[in-house]
Amino acid sequence: MTTLSTTISKNKNSLKIFAAIGLCLLGDAMLYTVLPTRIELFAFSGAQLGIILAANRFIRLFSNFWAADLYKKFGRNVPFKMAVIFSILITFSYGYFELFWQFLILRLLWGIVYSLLRLKALLIIFDSGLPENMQGKLSGIFRSMSRSGYMVGMILGGYLTDMFSMSGSAYILAALTGLSLFFIFSKNQKEDLNKCKEKEFVPASKTHLLELITDFKMFILMFMGFALNFTGLGLINSSYGLYLKNIFGENLLVFGIVIGIATLNGIILSTQSLFELILSPFLGNTADKHSTHKLLDYAFYLHAILMSLLVFIQNGFIAIIIPLILFINTAFLIIILYIEVNKFQKSSVSNRMAGFTTAVDLGAAFGPLTLIFLDVGLTLSFLYLTSAILLFTAGLLYRLNFKTT
């Protein structure tokens, strides 16, 4: 049986790619931590904040398929290297620009860039001839390494903003992102790393997305991905600073130390990356060994209950503990969902992954976009309750249509 250490030793070049992707996520993570707590500095309305934080996900409805086309036409190295370079420039620009339309353009560009970064990793894992008993492990390692970038970006981004300014934070994080160039331009980096089998790698067209949606079981898996990211990467990441501000105010006193709300928000949100950093390899290893998909519906029910607790029990303890449990559960769910999608055999790997990641991206996009409703009188509690209903529905649909026993 393939062990975790064997997977690491046999995929060292892949790990360099994963590390580069993690560094490219620093600026995006900083933005989610800082903007909700510094919205007054930019004179953004709640609607504009939601649009900025959602734009990069909505563009991926198209850019996920563009990425597949680019990798097919130019190979798997050139588009990826360009995406890394643009990541550095975009992160730097977060500190230079101030206007809404400027941030909107940056976020649209980032959405396209991220499609290229993520698809590179997914093709390495699921479309490069790896044995199935290694895919879960490598998927977990990728989640661990990429989310470590989010963890650093959220903590360091929030801290640097509280200490200096958002501009200073963006410039420093752009410099750190530049370290990714050492991974992708190293001398021993092989051309077209982990090439796919040509007969399987076909660019996913919009008609393929329609075919996936019309298969009800695949639609359920896509809906589950939508609901999961609507809650975590979407709603929680974009709004939790506001939730914490409602609970604690501008600052929190801990053991005589004053902690700014941006720092606190960064620490809490970064634990999602911390848990994925620590747990994902072991969760992937567990997924390779056991039928953990049998627990999917129960895990979604748990997610729904946790979101409901944020609505009905609002205090400091709940505000800090609940997201930690949510993030651990998310680390488990996302790995299992990717493996379930990979097992689905009615389309090519690239089609399935492009379709599923599009559903995931739409969920993550609609999450922050719902902040628009705060401007018309709705509350965060209403939005959190809506996410709980989506999660419960996703779990129920899976239970009714997949064998879970």
Image (tube, rainbow, N blue to C red):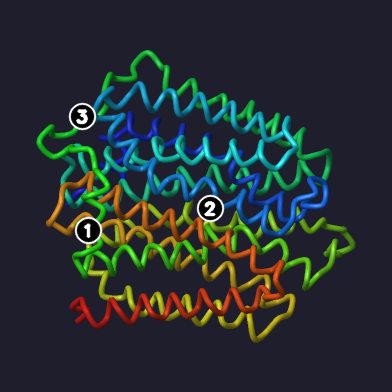
The amino acid type of the residue labelled 2 equals Ser
Identify the residue shown where x is 27% and y is 38%.
124
The amino acid type of the residue labelled 3 equals Lys
Q: Is residue 18 left or right of residue 69?
A: right
Nearest to N terminus: mark 3 or mark 1: 3
Nearest to N terminus: mark 3 or mark 2: 3
Residue 195: numbered disc: 3
Q: Quadrant of residue 400?
A: bottom left
Residue 212: numbered disc: 1
Front-most of residues 323 and 216? 216
User: Label 2 crowding class (10 Å Cα cut-off): few <14, some 14-19, many 20+?
Assistant: many
Identify the residue shown where x is 39% and y is 28%.
80
Q: Secondary structure at mark 1?
A: helix
Q: Secondary structure at mark 2?
A: helix
Q: Which residue is mark 2?
A: 273
The amino acid type of the residue labelled 1 equals Leu
Identify the residue shown where x is 24% and y is 56%.
210
Q: Is residue 219 left or right of residue 278?
A: left
